[in-house]
Amino acid sequence: MKKLLAIALSSSMMLGIAGCMKKAEVPSKKDVLAAAADEYDMEFTLDSKDISDDEKDAEWTLISEDGTLQVTVTWNYKNPDEFEFDDEEIDVPVETTEETSSEETTTSEETTTTSEETTASDPDNTTAGGETKSVAAAGTYVNFDEMNFYVNGKKYTLGVTTLQQMIDDGVPFEDEVIENAQNNLSANHASSGLQIPMGDYYYATITVINYSDSGMKMCDCEVNSVMLYTRENETSIVTFDFPLDLTMQDLEANAGLPEDGPRHYEDEDSDYYSDTYEYTKKSTMYANRLRYEFTFTRGSLYSIWMTWMP
């Protein structure tokens, strides 16, 4: 549920806003974590952040330290002393701290997954490994049978590709992702965000999941989500089976409307508004769902979030 809450930012920031008509400053990580802790009465870690080029809008994704809640915090310069919170429960706990053990662990048996047939799939519209598909054919923007994304034109598929495969391909992850790739990921856990930098304050984020009954090296786990904030006039090395200049009309024409319809939000105190299209499918193992989520702000595609679950 979305809600708007006025938060008293740090005194130094407030003085900066009030004094000499200075431009409102983007809140710090410390301010955001403190605001979320005060709102939900629990501690959080930062999963990802996105700050606009003009520093007039910002968004942070936080994960609670117990791994049960994901919170999106948004901020706009027109209301510099307010945060907007959007929360979602996580049924599969998320690892918010890196485990120090790097012992190699193996699962007792390989786990296979099944995919229910969906009307959106089109088996004749797939690409060979490594080839880029610029715009998908009609009816394929939302395809739970093959949830693809591309890095520098190389195709990867949620629930199939492992983190090690992406590392071996030279995907430009942050150094700490490579350094922690051998760490153990607990059974039935997803990792925290693993970032692919693409510019100043601009990156894509993936997670991997261990849905086995024993610990695994994180590098051997399958990628289960990818998130990207689009940025105008910025080239993204991460692409999808749909264009990054996708419109709401094009999405509806290709994929239809979500079961519950798009979620619309308007800020009463500014010209900000958003529409979120969330297409889901039931998981065979968890309460979480497979998901395609497209968020449009002021009519333009703002973010893409794809999640796969076994």
Image (cartoon, helix red, strand yellow):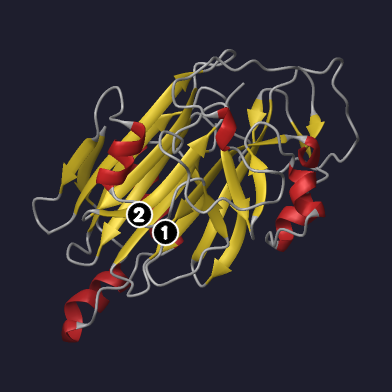
Q: Measured along the vertical axis of the image, is residue 297 above or below residue 289?
A: below
User: In the drawing, what numbered circle is on residue 230?
Assistant: 1
Q: Residue at x 67, y 23 (%)?
A: 188
Q: Residue furthest right?
A: 104
Label 2 element class: strand
Three-letter code, disc 2: Tyr
Of residues 8 and 203, the one drawn nearer to the viewer in this rendering: 203
Of labels 2 and 1, earlier in sequence is 1
Q: Measured along the vertical axis of the image, is residue 60 above or below residue 263?
A: below
Q: Residue at x 20, y 45 (%)?
A: 4
Q: Residue at x 69, y 23 (%)?
A: 211
Please provide percent x and percent y for residue 105.
88, 29
Residue identified by numbered label 2: 302
How many numbered marks are there? 2
Label 1 element class: loop
Q: Residue furthest left?
A: 268
Check if mark 2's residue and mark 1's residue have beta carbons within 8 Å: yes
Please provide percent x and percent y for residue 46.
51, 50
| Left or right of 1 on screen, residue 79 | left
Quarter of the picture containing the C terminus is: top right
User: In the drawing, what numbered circle is on residue 37?
Assistant: none
